[in-house]
Amino acid sequence: MTAQPRSAPPGGAGPSVVTHLPSRPPLPFDPAAPAHERGLALASALPVPLRTVLASGRVERRPRFGDRGFDGVTEEWTPPDGVSGQHALMARRALDELTGSVLAPASPDHLLARVLALLSHYPAKGTAPEVEHLVALDWAEDLGEFPAWAVDAAARTWRRTQKWRPSIAEMRALCEEACAPEWALARRLSVIAAAGASGDGAGGGTGHSRAGRLRALAGGAVRRMG
């Protein structure tokens, strides 16, 4: 006997139909492209109102000083007046997409493999393989907030320009430089999310907590100038 589909009872609703909303395409990103082209591609994927807010913001550049004196220039971006709750919602969605894909941290396995490969180009004399593996684990931990493509770019830059083994601090600086434009966009989106939320009370806690998280993750990841 062939089972027949059950019909809806008289006067009752028919079988429910689930309609799936179309998902947004992934952010266009080519880590091999120049930073300027990467920025244009990411900006083109944002909603027009959000692009307008980003283009209307104000940038203030300040010198940065470290333990050794001048350490480049930092940029502080301020959104224009009139950022709305709708802008904040768009910024939060774009921020989630950016930090969940382009800026997603590299996996521990990828980091460890990349670090071991880099260190193998500069073998340390008298270091036991077990110790070398522990050193690589330390590196993987200290580079853990960076995306895989930024770590790969930093390793490639060092291999092609230096003759000696890098330090963790030097590799972190190269990773920060590699993804500085993307982190700058993420920070600006975070500022828009916080500004729009504080303006009308829509999701203020979410915007401010994400802003704080981004500041902690981004740290010194700003474009080094001069």
Image (cartoon, helix red, strand yellow):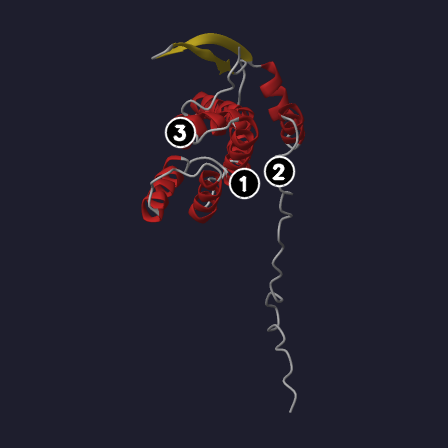
Q: Nearer the viewer, residue 157 or 127?
A: 127
Q: CA distance from mark 2 to mark 1?
A: 8 Å
Q: Amino acid at mark 3?
A: Ser
Q: Which residue is mark 3?
A: 167
User: Residue at 32% across / 44% down in the picture?
Assistant: 131
Q: Position of residue 83 (x, y in %)?
A: 53, 20
Residue 218 appears in which quarter of the rendering? Answer: top left
Q: Is residue 212 visible?
A: no
Mark sitting earlier along the chain (2/1): 2
Say what secondary structure mark 1 lies in: helix
> Disc number at residue 206?
none
Q: Is 200 left or right of 51, judged from the image as shown?
A: left
| Residue at which label 1 appears | 101
- Label 3 packing within 10 angstroms: few (<14), some (14-19), many (20+): few
View extreme (bottom): residue: 1
- Please indicate, yes or no, whether residue 222 appears anywhere in the rendered image: yes
Q: Give the alpha-carbon distance from disc 1 to disc 3, as whole Å.
A: 28 Å
